[in-house]
Image (cartoon, rainbow, N blue to C red):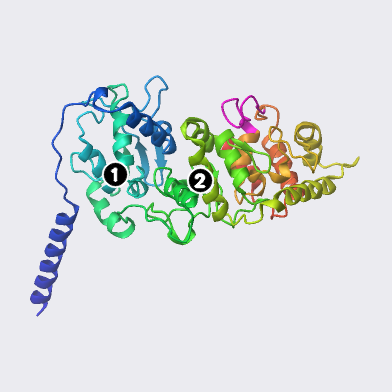
């Protein structure tokens, strides 16, 4: 009897393995001669350029600015480090021998030309939503770029996460292949914004927490997450900023890198705005702003300025400097207030009031710590505006005191825990 049961289990296991291998296996697609730039129209290449910007391809696939799209950028994950691939038309180390069919399969199904499974750090889970025309245009753009021979480093993923075949099982659990489906209850502009955000823009890849297997947690969609040691805040109504993202504020931020009622773009988001979205037409950014304001439930734009003025005034009342100032209050008064003091009725975009800054009210202090330590360079934030870093001037304890004071006086949120240790970790 035992032998029969054991034999049955073995047979079932062999059958299950055979079925899995059948599902996981994908054929290779024959290589082709690299396409010439003349194979595509200038209009198609230009549209592809915009799409590459919306997807921020250059940031992830560029290590050396003199070798754009040649890959090699390290992407730390809980499972080890991945390195971005070379997506220039080089035939040996890039995608020069990839046909449009092979490129489309990678974008839609997460399978390379050779038939191997692609790690979902390449966000095919979002690119699958893109239209045929957009994928064709993006292919035209990439194949028209300078071919660069550059082999990225080998990935250093831990076992068993380095076994690509297992990704077929991951896909069965977490990947829904298919094109974007418009919401008929929403307008054309909203749907265009949603298409960009969910497809080429892959916004939730940063702004949604991930589960233990690295998939976006659908139950926590748009709730914010820490990515590459920057905090990507919630984009829905759970965002704790005192003023919701109205259409105008969202557009200003996406177009210029800053908003008077929210602050400036730094870190990863600065790359998105200044390296990617700068190529997008106004109509696409307006559509994104419409979609984002709806997600944030910023329904009453007329109340935004009143809420902003109220938040600034409340923070100014709380501060009330005295001769017995504590360390954080003293530092804020003499190091920060001269730049960041705003008239409640007219917030300043270039020198934003801290009561309106997203980093102050976020659940994680990581963005505020990093900006305080390193400052905001001229290439981040708003054009022609910068902020010095205080890493050399202030100790970990002093920065923790400063940020604790700002949190207590400029928000109604609870204090951050272990703030000095978090400052120390970021400095290291």
The image quarter in which residue 348 lies = top right
Is residue 413 found left or right of 250 in the rendered image?
right
| Residue 379 image position (x, y, % from top left) | 56, 26
Give the number of the disc on residue 287.
2
Q: Position of residue 230 (x, y in %)?
A: 53, 41
Which residue is at the far bottom? Answer: 1
Helix, strand or loop for disc 2: helix
Left or right for 135, reference 388: left
Q: Position of residue 19 (x, y in %)?
A: 15, 60
Is 378 magenta? The answer is: yes
The residue positioned farthest toward the right in the image shown: 323
Badge 2 crowding class, 10 Å Cα cut-off, few under 14, some 14 to 19, many 20 or more, is many
Q: CA distance from mark 1 to mark 2?
A: 21 Å
Res 224 seen here: yes
Residue 350 is left or right of residue 194, and the answer is right
In depth, the one of 58 and 337 nearer the eye is 58
- Find the magenta span and give its range: 373-387
Mark 1 neighbour class, 10 Å CA radius: few under 14, some 14 to 19, many 20 or more: few
Q: Residue at x 19, y 30 (%)?
A: 97
Q: Which residue is mark 1?
A: 132
Tell me if 160 is positioned left or right of 306 in this view: left
Residue at image point 56% right, 35% down: 255
Q: Quadrant of the C terminus?
A: top right
């Amino acid at each position: 009897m035992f032998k029969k049961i054991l034999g049955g289990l073995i047979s079932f296991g062999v059958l299950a393995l055979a079925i899995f291998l059948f599902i996981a296996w994908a054929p290779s697609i024959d290589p082709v001669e690299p396409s010439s730039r003349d194979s595509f129209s200038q209009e198609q290449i230009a549209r592809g350029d915009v799409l590459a910007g919306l997807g921020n391809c250059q940031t992830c696939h560029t290590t050396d600015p003199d070798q754009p799209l040649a890959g090699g950028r390290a992407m730390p994950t809980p499972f080890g480090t991945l390195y971005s691939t070379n997506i220039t038309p080089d035939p040996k180390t890039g995608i020069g021998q990839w046909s449009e069919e092979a490129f489309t399969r990678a974008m839609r199904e997460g399978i390379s030309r050779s038939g191997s499974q692609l790690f979902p750090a390449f966000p095919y889970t979002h690119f699958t939503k893109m239209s045929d025309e957009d994928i064709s245009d993006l292919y035209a753009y990439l194949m028209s770029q300078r071919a660069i021979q550059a082999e990225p480093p080998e990935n250093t993923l831990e076992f068993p996460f380095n076994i690509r075949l297992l990704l077929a099982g991951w896909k069965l659990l977490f990947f829904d292949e298919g094109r974007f489906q418009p919401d008929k209850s929403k307008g054309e502009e909203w749907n265009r914004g949603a298409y960009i955000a969910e497809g080429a823009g892959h916004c939730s890849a940063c702004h949604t927490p991930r589960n233990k297997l690295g998939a976006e947690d659908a139950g926590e969609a748009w709730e914010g997450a820490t990515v590459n040691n920057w905090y990507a805040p919630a984009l829905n109504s759970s965002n704790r900023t005192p003023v919701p993202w109205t259409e105008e504020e969202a557009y200003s931020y996406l177009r210029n890198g800053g908003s008077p009622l929210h602050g400036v773009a730094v870190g990863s988001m600065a790359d998105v705005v200044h390296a990617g979205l700068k190529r997008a037409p106004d109509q696409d950014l307006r559509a994104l702003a419409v979609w984002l304001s709806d997600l944030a439930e910023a329904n009453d734009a007329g109340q935004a300025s009143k809420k902003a003025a109220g938040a600034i005034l409340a923070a100014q009342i709380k501060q009330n400097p005295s001769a017995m100032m504590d360390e954080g209050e003293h530092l804020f008064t003499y190091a920060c207030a001269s730049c960041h003091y705003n008239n409640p009725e007219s917030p300043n975009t270039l020198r934003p009031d801290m009561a309106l800054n997203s980093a102050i009210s976020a659940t994680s202090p990581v963005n505020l710590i990093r900006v305080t330590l390193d400052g905001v360079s001229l290439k981040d934030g708003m054009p022609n505006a910068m902020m010095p870093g205080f890493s050399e001037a202030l100790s970990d304890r002093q920065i923790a005191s400063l940020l604790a004071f700002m949190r207590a006086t400029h928000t109604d949120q609870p204090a951050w825990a272990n703030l000095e240790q978090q400052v120390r970790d970021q400095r290291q």
